Structures are given as structure tokens and as C-alpha cells.
Amino acid sequence: MSKKITSVFLLLCLLAPGPLLFTYLEYQKKMVRKSVKWKMIEGIDKDELVLLAFTPQQKEELLNWKHNREFEYAGEMYDIVEQFTRNDTHFYYCWWDKEETLLNRKLDRLLADMSGADPQKNKDNARWTLLFKSLYRPQSETSTQSVLTKKITHFFFYSFSVKTSLYPPSPPPPEFG
């Protein structure tokens, strides 16, 4: 019975960090939204706001709306404090929500790590795979050489293989004269 409990506990220790971190970041995002809402209610100076202007076409193409008072533009989050339209152009006085933008980036990075969609991580994994493949090459079974000769040949082959396949040749020395 204690082995089952221990194994379940260890499994939870391996699987829990990702979802727990995701839940924590979502909670932080919710708290940031609330604090921004209270700042808006208390009244933010117009000097602290960003004025953004969009044509109707730009509004449809460039803005990713979260709800009617919040949108994402160019990877940054904005909360609308005041809006008006003049000559077919929509103007928004917005609070540039840098904290929520940072939290969204952390969440995106976490989801990319959990799903294996991180290009840098995939590139690193491919390099490790290439290294291990270059270090291990199966021996041919039809060889009639002695075991000692195979191991020595195998060792030198690998040393040569690693140097030629992973590292480019060094440039020639400069010529003086």
C-alpha cells in the first residue's frame, strides 16, 4: 500500500508543476486586471494614457479583442479608458497594461514548453540527437575481424566522425607578405 502511495506522490510531483504554474499565472493575470480596473475608476491622468487611432479596416485586422474594453495590439495589451470616433477613425485612450503583457508572454512560453512547440528547444534537441547518433553507430555483424580490432577501429571511427560532422574545418591561417 505504501508503495502505491509513494508512486502516486512521485507521479504528482512530476506532473503538477506545469498546471500549477499555469493556474498561478492565470490568477496573477486576473489580479492585474482588477488593479487596472480600480486605477481606471480612480481616474488615470491623460498623460499616463496612450492614444491609439485606427481605421475600421485596421481595427478589424490589427486588434485582437479580449472583451469590449480590452484588446491586444502588436503583442501588447491595452485597456480602453476612453474612446471616440472622428472622420471614420476610431480613437482610443488606453492604459498600456505592461504587467498583463508580461504575464501573457510567460503563459505563452509555459504552454510552448509544455507542448514541445518551442523552436529553440526543438533545435537544441535536434543537436543532441545528432551528437548521440554520431557517437553511436552499429557494428556490422559480417565482419571477421577480432573483437579487439573492432573496438579500436570503432573508437577511431567515432573520434573522426564527431570532429568532421559537428565542427566545420578551421579557416586557413592569414598570409603575410
Image: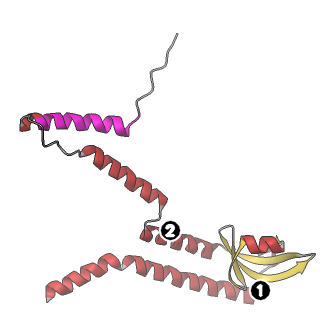
Residue 34 picture location, percent across and down:
63, 87
The picture quadrant where one finds residue 65 is: bottom right
Tell me if residue 78 comes above or below residue 162 in the rendering. below
Q: Amino acid at mark 2?
A: Arg
Residue 162 part of the magenta-drawn span: yes
Mark 1 lies on residue: 43
Residue in front for this viewpoint, 83 or 152: 152
**Residue at the spot x=44%, y=22% of the render?**
172
Give the residue at the far front of this rendering. Answer: 142
The crowding category of the residue bearing disc 2, from other C-alpha atoms within 10 Å (few below 14, some 14 to 19, many at least 20), is some
Residue 109 is tagged as: 2
* Colouring rule applied to residues: secondary structure
Task: Provide the residue span drawn in magenta.
Answer: 150-168
Measure how far apart labels 1 and 2 are at the Cα level.
Answer: 33 Å
8 sits left or right of 146 in the view: right
The picture quadrant where one finds residue 71 is: bottom right
The picture quadrant where one finds residue 13 is: bottom left
Residue in front for this viewpoint, 59 or 30: 59
Q: Secondary structure at mark 2?
A: helix
74 sits left or right of 151 in the view: right
Main structural element of the magenta stretch: helix, strand or loop? helix
Residue 101 is tagged as: none
Check the picture and name the quadrant holding the N terminus: bottom left
Residue in front for this viewpoint, 123 or 106: 123
Tell me if residue 93 comes above or below residue 140 in the rendering. below
Residue 75 picture location, percent across and down:
65, 68
- Residue mark closest to the camera, 1 vs 2: 2
CB under 8 Å between callouts 1 and 2? no
Residue 47 picture location, percent across and down:
80, 74
Sequence-first tag of 1 and 2: 1
Residue 139 picture location, percent across and down:
17, 43
